[in-house]
Each structure stands twice: as C-alpha cells, then as structure tokens.
Amino acid sequence: MSAESFAADVPGPRVRGKHQRAAILKRAADLASLDGLEQVTIGRLASAMQMSKSGLYAYFTSKEDLQLATIHNAWGVFDAHVLEGAETVEEMLRRWIAYYAHEVFPGGCPLATAAMEFANRDGPVHDALAGAVQRQHAAIHDAVLRASAERLRTDVDADQVAFEIHAVLLAGNQRFRMSRDPAAFAHTQTAITRLLEPPRGGDS
C-alpha cells in the first residue's frame, strides 16, 4: 500500500472525534439506564471511558450539556428501533415492545427511567425529557389516527387511545424491569390489541 492510499484510509481528526463522541454517548446512555441520568457526570464517564476529565470537556462543556446530549442520543436509538420506517400502528407497537424486551440498553430504556427521575425538577434536562415523552405520545397518536379510518371508528378519540397505549407500554416495561418476567410483554401486547380492536357491531 502506498503512503498516499494509507493516508486516505486513516480517518481524519474530525471523523475520529465524531466516532469518539458517539462512543462516549453510548456509554453515557448505558450508565443512565443502569444508575440514572443524575449519575452521568463528567468524572464518572471519564473513569468509565478511561479518559481524563479534560478530554471529556473537549466534547461537553458541563454535566448538563452531557446529560442533554445523552438524552438526544437515547432518543436517536429509540427512534431507529421503534419509529423509523414503521408502516402501521401495529408494527410500531410491536417494535416498541421488542425494544423494551430485548434490552437495547443494559438497564432498560434510559428515557423512561430518566423521565420519572426528573419529573419533579425544573430546567433544561427536565424539559428535554418532557419533550421526548410528548414525542412518544404524538407518534402513537398519529399512528392511531392514520389507522382509524380503516380499523377503528372514524370518530375515535386518538388522544385517549394513545394515552392508554402509552400507559400500557410503560406499565409492561416497569413490570418486566421489576420481575424479569417476559410474560409482562405478552400482557402488554394483549392489552394493546384490545385497545386497537374495532368496537363490536362496527361503527354503529
């Protein structure tokens, strides 16, 4: 291999920096899922990544900046596993259950745990988590609305159905996290199927 081709194959500083930041945020999201978002600090993450604190400060200016980036990263993972490319409400919700069941993060979904952790706080981290919860609800709402003309009553209360489905998903995830019993997700799927079933007798 010539020196020129070798140099072309070696990623530049910006690419290496991007990959390093992605690796840091993956570790941060894993830590948040296991120990809570409040435990994701510059010092804790530097130790986990075997980096200096100053090395981490090159990527994040503060603990809050790190936590916000961790939320953004966790949302991207959730979106890729659950929302992106889902063509029907049923497909999206099956993928949502699988995302919980397959433990994409070692301690479960960091968005779900952090939302409760920061529920009674104020500030940008709380607001980012509240936004993530609202986007989840909106995704269910929009999918239910799209399906309503074909499988549900045209006058269905999509907001109420979305609220109930979201609640069932969170309850199933909590039951699994506490009991480690995969039957929790069978119950979740059964409840969701009932919520999506057209009423007996059609639209009348």
Image (cartoon, rainbow, N blue to C red):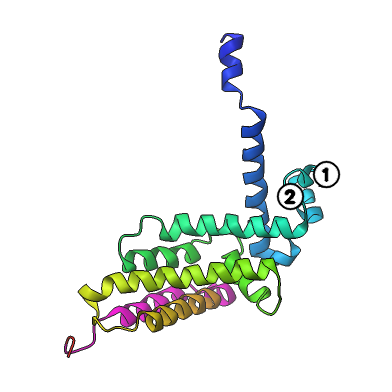
Residue, disc 1: 54
Height in image: 134 above or below 49?
Answer: below
Position of the C terminus, as image quadrant, is: bottom left
Magenta run includes residue 186: yes
Residue 197 percent coordinates (x, y): 27, 81
Height in image: 183 above or below 19?
Answer: below
Q: Secondary structure at mark 2?
A: loop
Left or right: 126, with 158 as reference point: right
Q: Residue at x 33, y 73 (%)?
A: 144
Q: Residue at x 59, y 76 (%)?
A: 178
Residue 60 is labelled as 2
Magenta run includes residue 39: no
Q: Which comes sooner in the sequence, label 1 or label 2?
A: 1
Q: Which residues are magenta?
A: 176-201
In the rendered image, which quarter is residue 42 located in?
bottom right
Residue 70 percent coordinates (x, y): 64, 57
Q: Residues within 10 Å of mark 2 (few under 14, many from 20)?
A: some
Nearer-the-camera pick, 131 or 37: 131
Nearer-the-camera pick, 133 or 33: 133
Pointers 1 and 2 in contact (CB under 8 A)? no
Amino acid residing under circle 2: Phe
Q: CA distance from mark 1 to mark 2?
A: 10 Å
